[in-house]
Image: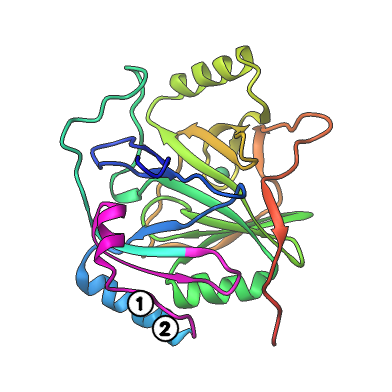
Amino acid sequence: MADGSLRFRNDELDWRITIHPGDADDLAYLGWDVGSADGLARATEAIAAAGCEVHGGDVALAAIRGVEDVAWFLDPFGFRHEFTHGPHIGATPFQPGADCVRFVTGEGGLGHAVLIVPDLDAATDFYVGAMGFGHSDDIDMGLFVRFLHCNQRHHTLAFSTVPGMVGFHHLMLEVTDPDVVERAYARARADQVPVAMTLGKHTNDEMFSFYVRTPSGFEIEYGAGGRLIDPDDWETVRFDAMSHWGHEAPSPPLFPGILRPASWTDHT
Ligand SMILES: [Fe+2]
């Protein structure tokens, strides 16, 4: 694009990922499709009620994002979220970089994002209470991770806590075929892309995946076979392990994603 940003599509939409030039490697924003103008009104009302300033009605921003309408806000930790509806469909059919690749998106969205937040309870209050996510489950293995859903995908947002810090750990992209995952893993190894976690299968969402570290410091999880859930009939549980097998970190492990001091302070 004219401003130097790069857009990537992985299905029929014009694009789902944008990389913007910037002074620092960081997560610029997360986009959430709330389905309709009514959905946007309800979602922004809940965010405003939670005490966040909501910025809406920006036609130019909607055009830049390739959606009918958008409203954005900063969550209590400073992450920028953008509620949207009416994404643009690409003028041409999606052509994957490799013929065998089909991404799992649709109603389940792009994949999932994992954040690092300074406070577990405050994050749960905001993402569940204000943004409306459902609580899928937790993994507690010394490291604690909480998983949230907003559709049939087992989780779309997850977070771990590091006191005083915020960060972006990884973005997950799912494909339909486990063989594609194994091929990508072999290619990452052959090309000496930094592998943050080897092939493995997660306990909670049953994803068969591996993790690579991007040049910006966050990780991409690339996998297949993620579990689908029924959000209306779901019981929250706790796991004591992250994976059934695999997902081994190198020694010494890579730094876990992008991490920076939080400007957020606990006023409770
Ligand atoms: Fe993940």
Q: Which mark is residue 226?
A: none
In this picture, which residue range is highlighted in magenta? 51-80
Image quadrant for the C terminus? bottom right
Residue 65, image x, y percentages: 31, 53
Residue 248, image x, y percentages: 72, 31
Give, as a three-letter code, the residue at label 1.
Thr
Residue 198, image x, y percentages: 66, 27
- Ligand 1 within 8 A of label 2's CB? no
* Residue drawn at the location 28% of the way across and 36% of the way down: 11
Q: Is 127 rendered above or below residue 16?
A: below
Residue 56 figure quarter: bottom left
Q: Secondary structure at mark 2?
A: helix
* Residue drawn at the location 49% of the way across and 64% of the way down: 80
- Between 203 and 100, the one lying in front of the other is 100
Q: Residues within 10 Å of mark 2 (few under 14, many from 20)?
A: some
- Between 188 and 198, the one lying in front of the other is 188
Residue extending furthest right? Answer: 252
Asked if marks 1 and 2 touch (Cβ < 8 Å), the reply is: yes
Q: Is 216 rendered above or below residue 143?
A: above
Q: Which residue is mark 1?
A: 44
Give, as a three-letter code, the residue at label 2.
Ala
Q: Which residue is mark 2?
A: 48
The answer to whether 240 appears left or right of 126 in the picture is: right
* Residue drawn at the location 30% of the way across and 78% of the way down: 42
CA gap, disc 1 to disc 2? 6 Å
- Ligand 1 within 8 A of label 1's CB? no
Q: Secondary structure at mark 1?
A: helix
